[in-house]
Image (cartoon, helix red, strand yellow):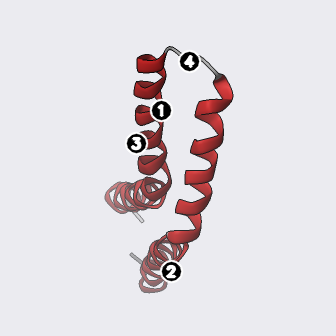
Amino acid sequence: MNEVDALELVQTALRTAIWMCAPLVLPSMVVGIIIALLQALTQIQESTLTFVPKMIVVFLSAMASAAFVGAQLQALTETTYDRIATGF
């Protein structure tokens, strides 16, 4: 394994990590922006008003995207093991 192989493996792992986190982060970010706008419009500054809906959205997103995240992790694992088996 040389530097190019190691760099490519790290890039693939980081790209996979970003794709695995996106289904959880993006809906939470959208809900956070919507709630922040509603709080700014109504001038209600309650901290639990932002926390609870985000937690619910993250939980529902995790349930909905579990198959996608598992498939991404499996693809990364298979690619890594195949490269190890062939000697990079």
Q: Which residue is at 68% across, 30% downward?
A: 48
Which of labels 3 and 1 is toward the front? 1
Q: Which residue is mark 2?
A: 81
Say few, some or many: other residues with alpha carbon within 10 Å of mark 2 (under 14 / 14 to 19 / 20 or more): few
Q: Which residue is at 44% across, 40% downward?
A: 29
Please report contact status of discs 4 and 2: CB closer than 8 Å, yes or no. Answer: no
Please report contact status of discs 1 and 4: CB closer than 8 Å, yes or no. Answer: no
Type of residue at label 3?
A: Val
Q: Residue 58: which numbered mark, if any?
A: none
C-alpha gap between disc 4 and disc 3: 19 Å
Local SS, label 4: loop
Mark 1 or mark 4, earlier in chain: 1
Please report contact status of discs 2 and 1: CB closer than 8 Å, yes or no. Answer: no
Relative to residue 43, is residue 13 depicted above or below? Answer: below
C-alpha gap between disc 2 and disc 3: 37 Å
Local SS, label 1: helix
Type of residue at label 1?
A: Ile
The image position of residue 7, as x and y in percent, is: 36, 54
Q: The C terminus lies in which quarter of the figure?
A: bottom left
Local SS, label 3: helix
Q: Which residue is mark 1?
A: 35
Mark 4 or mark 3, earlier in chain: 3
Q: The N terminus lies in which quarter of the figure?
A: bottom left
Please report contact status of discs 3 and 1: CB closer than 8 Å, yes or no. Answer: no
Q: Residue 15 falls in which quadrant of the image?
A: bottom left
The image position of residue 44, as x and y in percent, is: 56, 18
Which of labels 2 and 1 is toward the front? 1
Type of residue at label 4?
A: Ile
Mark 2 or mark 3, earlier in chain: 3
C-alpha gap between disc 1 and disc 4: 10 Å
